[in-house]
Amino acid sequence: MIKNALRIVTITLFILISCSGHVFSFDLDMTVEDDIRKNYNSSKLVNDTNTDDLEELPELPQNLKNTSNVKVTNTAKTPQAVIINQPKGNTKISKGTSFYVVNTDKISDWQTKGTSVKFKTTSPVYKKKYSIPASTVFYGEIVDSHQPQISCNGGLVVIRIKSMLYKGQNIPVNAYVTRANDKIIFLNNIKGERTYLKTVWKKGNWGRNLFNRMLTLTVSLGRDGSTFILSPFPIVYGTICLGANTIISPFTAFVQKGKHVSINAGSNFRIKLSDDVFID
C-alpha cells in the first residue's frame, strides 16, 4: 500500500510540473569558446597582448645590454717578457780580479767630489781567454772626500773606478781600491793618519819635562845640607803639574786634527773588480 501511495504522489508531482507555464533551462553560450579556439596562436601571444596596459619598465644599464655578444676572457695577467741587456763582449773578466796600477796625477783630500783620476797598469795580465797589456788605462772618480777633522781624524778620499780603455774602447767597469801608496785600504777609504794617541802623548810632554826638571832640582838641593829642607818642594810641584797635564792632555788633543791624504803621482795602487766585465 505504501509503495502504491508513493507512486501516485510522484506521478501527481510530475503532472503538475509539466503543466506549469514556467520552464527552467540552462543555456551555455559556447560562441566565446569557439572564437578563442579559432583565433588562438601561441606564437603570437605576446604580440596580441595590449602593451599599453603594461607598466613601462626602466631601460637596462648599458653594461648589461647585448650580453649575448660578451666574450669571456681570462682576467689573469700574462707575465711580461723581461728584456735582459746582453753584454757587448764575449769574454768575461770575473769579478774579484785585481790589477796593479799607478796613479798618473797627485791625489789628495783637497780634491773635491767628482774629480777625475787616472791609473795605468804596471804589468800585463795573462789569462787563458784574454790578456790585459801593460799601461792599460783605468778611469776613476772621487766620490767622497774631506780634509782632516777634529778628534785627530785624518782626511778622506774615496775613489770609484768606472771605466777601462781596452783596444780603443772605453769599457764600463765597477772597481774599488784595495791598496794605496803600498798601504792596505779597508772599505775603499783612503784615510789620512789618525793622530789622537800621538797628540795625547805630545800634549803631555810639558808635564813630563817639568817633572824631570823638578826632580833634578830636588836632587841638587838635597846634596847641599843648607838647602836640604827645601828639596821636597820642587818634586811636589813637578808631580802636581805632571798629574794635571796628564788629565788635561786627552781633552786638548781631542780638538786637534789628523793628517792630510796626499799621494804623489806614480804611487802604487791595487784595484779590484766588483762586477764581471765583458770584453771582445
Image: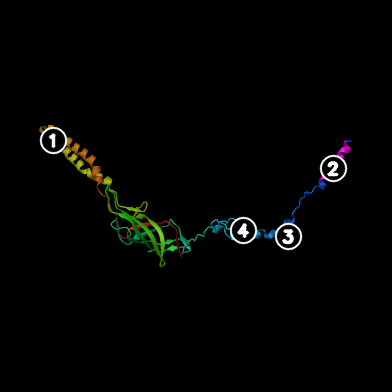
Considering every residue shown, the one lying at the far bottom of the view is: 168
**Disc 4: which residue:** 51
| Numbered mark located on residue 221 in the image | 1
Amino acid type for the residue under numbered disc 4: Thr
Please tell me whether mark 2 sits on a helix, a strand or a loop: helix
The residue depicted at 87 percent of the width and 40 percent of the height is: 8
Question: Over which residues does the magenta segment extend?
Answer: 2-16
**Disc 2: which residue:** 12
Q: Give the CA distance from mark 2 to mark 1.
A: 186 Å
Q: Residues within 10 Å of mark 2 (few under 14, many from 20)?
A: few
What kind of colouring is applied to the model shown? rainbow
The secondary structure that dominates the magenta segment is: helix
Q: Give the CA distance from mark 1 to mark 3.
A: 158 Å
Which callout, 1 or 3, points at the residue further toward the start of the chain?
A: 3
Which callout, 2 or 1, points at the residue further toward the start of the chain?
A: 2
Q: Give the CA distance from mark 2 to mark 4.
A: 62 Å
Horizontal side of 176 relative to 258 (left or right) equals right
Q: Is residue 36 above or below residue 15?
A: below
> Given contact means CB atoms under 8 Å apart, are the residues at marks 2 and 3 in contact?
no
- Mark 2 vs mark 4: give the one in front: 2
Q: Residues within 10 Å of mark 4 (few under 14, many from 20)?
A: few
**Dividing the picture into quarters, in which one does residue 232 lie?**
top left
The residue depicted at 21 percent of the width and 39 percent of the height is: 244
186 or 222, which lies in front?
A: 186
Q: Position of residue 46 (x, y in %)?
A: 65, 58
Taking the magenta stretch, the answer to whether it contains residue 12 is yes
**Disc 3: which residue:** 38
Which callout, 2 or 3, points at the residue further toward the start of the chain?
A: 2
Amino acid type for the residue under numbered disc 2: Thr
> Given contact means CB atoms under 8 Å apart, are the residues at marks 1 and 3 in contact?
no
